[in-house]
Image (cartoon, rainbow, N blue to C red):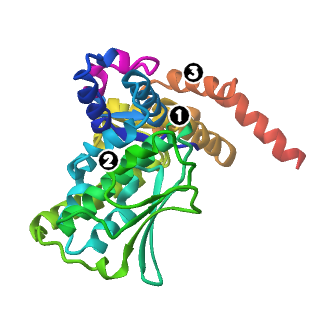
Amino acid sequence: MAQSIILPVSYIQIAIRELSNKGITPEQIFEGTKLSCHSIQKDGYVTLDQFIKVILNTRKLSNNPAIGLLLGSFLHPSTHGPVGWAAINSPTLSDAINIFQRYSQIRTPFILYTTLTHGEDYIIRLTLTDSLKAAHLIFIEAMLMLLQHIIEFILGRPMTEANLYMNSFKPSYADSYGQYFHCPVHFNSGHLEIRLPIAMKNTANPNADKHMYQIALEQCQEAHHQLRRDINISTEIYDYISANLSCSPTLEYTAIHFGLTPRTLIRRLKDQQTSFQKIKDEVYAFQASGYLRRSVIAIDTLSVIFGYTDPANFRRSFKRWFGMSPQQYREQQTEILKRH
């Protein structure tokens, strides 16, 4: 079952603030996305496709090919939520980068962070796991700027000893890189990575707050757990309904059980190309067919097991699932068994 990537609106809000200074309205930025100021405030998330469209609109409206660098310069670590807070309160530089390595999927699931050492270099490598289409370089530039903010926050100075390697062709605005990055930038490289002297790997963070680090780390762990559950939410709901057939769980009650609002549950299931009613029908159809094939239990009794107060409603539901009545289904299955 496909899982649609969703991203927090905080990144889009930065673009809105920047372009509003140039007289560009949110409506122009949202063109072709079905988004509005109201919808992003209410939902708090957008799909990857919507995000890409907003970023491409931003580049076009600003007439600034280096918009990724500009937006990245506004990315304070706090924009990255608990991941950013945990990073800037980490005990050492390597601890901060490990936070991104472990929990980046919470905020930017399309980027995989890897750390390795090679000779005298400590390497932070970025790998894109999903297609960002024409917005590829914009995203990369913004995320590299964020990493620079994190590294320099811990170092307490510009990362002049670093080297930045881009696995892309040199863009027409390459001179702009020197205005934003504080180290040499190399294009057409085999990997996308930041290389630091290995001696900097365990640089102590003078601004680390142990209490804040622990709180942010716990939030990262909870958000990661929630993300894992979201990915498998349809399976968990299937199991939950199966275990509570006689209660006939409603959408609202199920949402409460999973600590969600009905609206959020609907959206997350839609992201997985399904719905609560579709899952519920699958559960009941599977369970009902099993009872009818393997037992002689009365159909009226079966309706009670499935939480129907009126057996007629159960019969109508069954006919919707299988195109025949429960009795016809039982007779059909009996004939099939006889033939085998």
Horizontal side of 144 relative to 207 (left or right) equals right
The stretch in magenta equals 28-41
Mark 1 and mark 2: span between their CA atoms?
47 Å
In the rendering, at what x and y percent does residue 261 appear? 29, 34
Mark 3 and mark 2: span between their CA atoms?
69 Å
| Foreground tag (1 vs 2) | 2
- Residue under the point 71% across and 32% down: 329
Q: How many marks?
A: 3
At mark 1, the secondary structure is: loop
Does the stretch in magenta take in 37? yes
Residue that mark 2 sits on: 179
Residue that mark 3 sits on: 316
Tell me the quarter of the picture where residue 100 sits. Answer: bottom left
Q: Residues within 10 Å of mark 3 (few under 14, many from 20)?
A: some
Q: Which sits in the foreground, 267 or 159?
A: 159
Residue that mark 1 sits on: 274
Residue 250 seen anywhere in this rendered image of the structure? no
Establish if 272 lies above or below 152.
Answer: above
Residue type at the position of mark 1: Thr
In the rendering, at what x and y percent does residue 323 appear? 69, 23
Residue type at the position of mark 2: Gln
In the rendering, at what x and y percent does residue 75 appear? 26, 45
